[in-house]
Amino acid sequence: MARWYVCGLALAAAELLLIFATVFSAKGLRGKEFQGASRIPSQFSEEERVAMKEALKGAIRIPTVSFSHEKSNTTALAEFGEYIHKVFPTVFSTNFIQHEVVEQYSHLFTVQGSDPSLQPYMLLAHFDVVPAPEEGWEVPPFSGLERDGFIHGRGTLDNKNSVMAILQALELLLIRNYIPQRSFFIALGHDEEVSGTRGALKISELLQARGIQVAFLVDECSFIFDGFIPNLKKPCAMVSVTEKGALDLLLQVNMTPGHSSAPPKETSIGILAAAVSRLENTPMPNMFGSGPLKMTLEQLANEFPFPTNIVLKNLWLFRPLVSRLMERNYITNTLVRTTTALTMFNAGVKVNVIPPVAQASVNFRIHPAQTVHEVLELVKNIVADDRVQLHVLRAFDPLPISPSDDKALGYQLLRQTIQSIFPEVDIVAPGICIANTDSRHYTNITAGIYHFNPVYLQPQDFSSIHGINEKISVQAYETQVKFIFELIQNADTYTGPVPHVHEL
Ligand SMILES: CCCCCCCC/C=C\CCCCCCCC(=O)N[C@@H](CC(C)C)C(=O)O
Ligand SMILES: [Zn+2]
Ligand SMILES: [Zn+2]
């Protein structure tokens, strides 16, 4: 009798556990992983909300333009340093935060957590911007004007929004007497738009000299994508786990100059034009199937209607079809191959002179499954003309793929913070950063490099980045501050992923 009773109790307990496991499975339990320590709610007063948007507007008004490696607006870069001192006084006066200026304009903050057993992490952003000539803008690009609920201007998405949101979230936490448990670094670069070799690289060297290794870092270059994939009605938060490499090539042809009245059969211009045309017409191989894209599509499969869901769930069978479909769209094409962009072409000085030299620049963004060396070999085979000299101007391999499994602290913290701040977003998937960022300078201090901006991005917003009419809604910026406010707290209280039902 007693045995039956114990057995019955055990069964009831098991049933209860199962119910709990189902209800609180990874999707059902939003934010529960972070319980334990007392949390500060991410609610801001009206006064704070006004102050935070005004702070961003002020940042946009400082024209911190990087024109080229040699030329930047150093007055504005210095002014930006003074500006953040002014708008985030608590960050600069807190005794457990150390602030250092690196290479005159970049900023490194070391926030000393109370628990030295927790490995630190790092938040990255940059405050230099690309130039913005006024033509075509609805409002002047450095006015920081608010119109129809949007703050307009260069840097509102790339990337002063992140610089300001990180410092703003920290300022608000400190005002509420928050003491972080896990140490973290904030690295704000001043020359990302022209390579980051003065800012990010030097900060990274400084940290390496101090023997610092971080668990993960979070940088720009990915968003909550909305409307990018045909038929995918839902937004998709893409946390990029790798970044493409790059190869800048100068192609040069030298021929004998002369009078245009008696032209040779071939000129430097004609030879070079044919070579670059071959490059443009011979895309690099489709690498679909290698790299994180397969994981991304498998996660997206359920969100598509029939029959796309079946196709995506059976990539072993439909790989050729899916890879062909992806290369048809210019954005999804970037995810399946090394891209080739002809960006500069120079030759000639006068209409009746055969020029001796013709030069062209080509910019390749290297797929994570290829290397600089492999791309260079392919280029040589495509150009296949010894008269065309190839000079490597700049080259770096793609970044290694950062983990996105259940044990990957950075990825899981981002995933779970996305789920709590954006409950309407069902899809969080690993992705590829198709451009280059300051992150690549930090590969020696972490194996966990993640790209994510907690902001919705639609195709028209994408073209505003480095284009015209860049803007962010006031509400999106507030949400970004809220996200970082939560992320910092989550990093302190994270206790690991919620077990899936089958693990019980
Ligand atoms: C499910 C949807 C798939 C979406 C595909 C991806 C769409 C890409 C969207 C946004 C990418 C934004 C990139 C913003 C970061 C730009 C950083 C940058 O411009 N860096 C320079 C660095 C260079 C070293 C000067 C660059 O040229 O890459
Ligand atoms: Zn950027
Ligand atoms: Zn940029």
Image: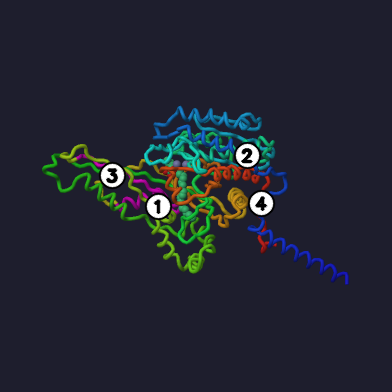
Pointer 3 or 2: first along the chain: 2
Drawn side of residue 445 relative to residue 173, left or right: left
Query: Which residue is disc 4 drawn over?
Result: 31
Residue 156 forms part of the magenta stretch: no
Drawn side of residue 365 relative to residue 241, left or right: left
Quarter residue 11 falls in: bottom right
Mark 2: few, some, or many residues within 10 Å (few <14, many ≥20)?
Answer: few
Q: Residue at x 40, y 62 (%)?
A: 324
Query: Which residue is disc 3 drawn over?
Result: 389
Query: Which residue is disc 2 drawn over?
Result: 46
Ligand 1 contact, mark 1 (Cβ < 8 Å): no
Pointer 4 or 1: first along the chain: 4
The amino acid pointed to by label 2 is: Glu
Find numbered disc 3 in the image and state the secondary structure of the residue it sits on: strand
Q: Position of residue 221 (x, y in %)?
A: 49, 46
The amino acid pointed to by label 4 is: Gly
Pointer 4 or 2: first along the chain: 4
Find numbered disc 2 in the image and state the secondary structure of the residue it sits on: helix
Drawn side of residue 21 relative to residue 482, left or right: right
Nearer the observer: mark 4 or 2; the answer is 2
Query: Which residue is disc 1 drawn over?
Result: 338
Nearer the observer: mark 1 or 2; the answer is 2
